[in-house]
Image (cartoon, rainbow, N blue to C red):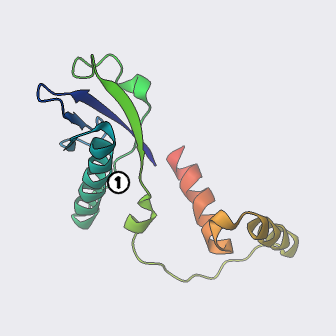
């Protein structure tokens, strides 16, 4: 998931910021790159503690959602990509039924798009995409 982050230059010429879609998630760094690395770690820690406590994973919105926020003026916007799949819980084996021709097409697609890793990875990615749009 791509989280928009807002950062600004401090009086000491370092950078700090926050993640508008993740309440209480702040970050800082000596440089913009350091701050964005810290933002990634901060989001990761927040999501991990939230899911461990039984809360839902925060949903990232777009920058336009926050563009007029008085706390988001005079600084910089960036995005931080976080792989949320590791917070979905342990893998569970299940038995599903699909038409043979559809399964053949899925397997062929996965063979040519190795980013999915497997048939299960492909189906999980599509399910995440659809659920995010729900």
Above or below, comparing residue 7 to residue 130 in the picture: above
Rendering quarter of residue 57: bottom left
Above or below, comparing residue 113 to residue 130 in the picture: below
User: Label 1's element?
Assistant: loop
Which class describes the residues within 10 Å of circle 1: few (<14), some (14-19), or many (20+)? some
Residue name at image x 34 percent, y 42 percent: 33
Above or below, comparing residue 70 to residue 102 in the picture: above
Rendering quarter of residue 112: bottom right
Residue designated by label 1: 57
Q: Position of residue 8 (x, y in %)?
A: 24, 27
Residue name at image x 32 percent, y 16 percent: 68
Q: Position of residue 88 (x, y in %)?
A: 41, 66
Can I make out residue 64 in this image?
Answer: yes
Residue 29 vs residue 123, the one in the foreground: 29
Residue name at image x 64 percent, y 64 percent: 115
Q: Looking at this rendering, what residue extends furthest in the right direction?
A: 101
Q: How many marks?
A: 1
Q: Looking at this rendering, what residue extends furthest in the left direction?
A: 12
Residue 4 vs residue 47, the one in the foreground: 4
Q: Position of residue 9 (x, y in %)?
A: 22, 27
Rendering quarter of residue 117: bottom right
Residue name at image x 21 percent, y 41 percent: 30
Q: Is residue 30 left or right of residue 131?
A: left
Can I make out residue 134 in this image?
Answer: no
């Amino acid at each position: 998931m791509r989280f928009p982050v807002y950062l600004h230059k401090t009086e000491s010429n370092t950078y700090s910021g926050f993640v508008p879609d993740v309440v209480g998630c702040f970050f800082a760094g000596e440089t913009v790159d350091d701050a964005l690395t810290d933002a990634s770690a901060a989001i990761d820690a927040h999501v991990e503690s939230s899911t461990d406590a039984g809360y839902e994973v925060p949903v990232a919105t777009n920058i336009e959602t926050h563009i007029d926020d008085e706390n988001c003026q005079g600084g910089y916007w960036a995005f931080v990509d976080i792989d949320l799949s590791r917070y979905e819980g342990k893998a569970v084996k299940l038995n599903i039924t699909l038409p043979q021709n559809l399964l053949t097409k899925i397997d062929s697609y996965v063979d040519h798009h190795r980013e999915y890793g497997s048939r299960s990875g492909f189906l999980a990615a599509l399910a995440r995409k659809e659920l995010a749009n729900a």
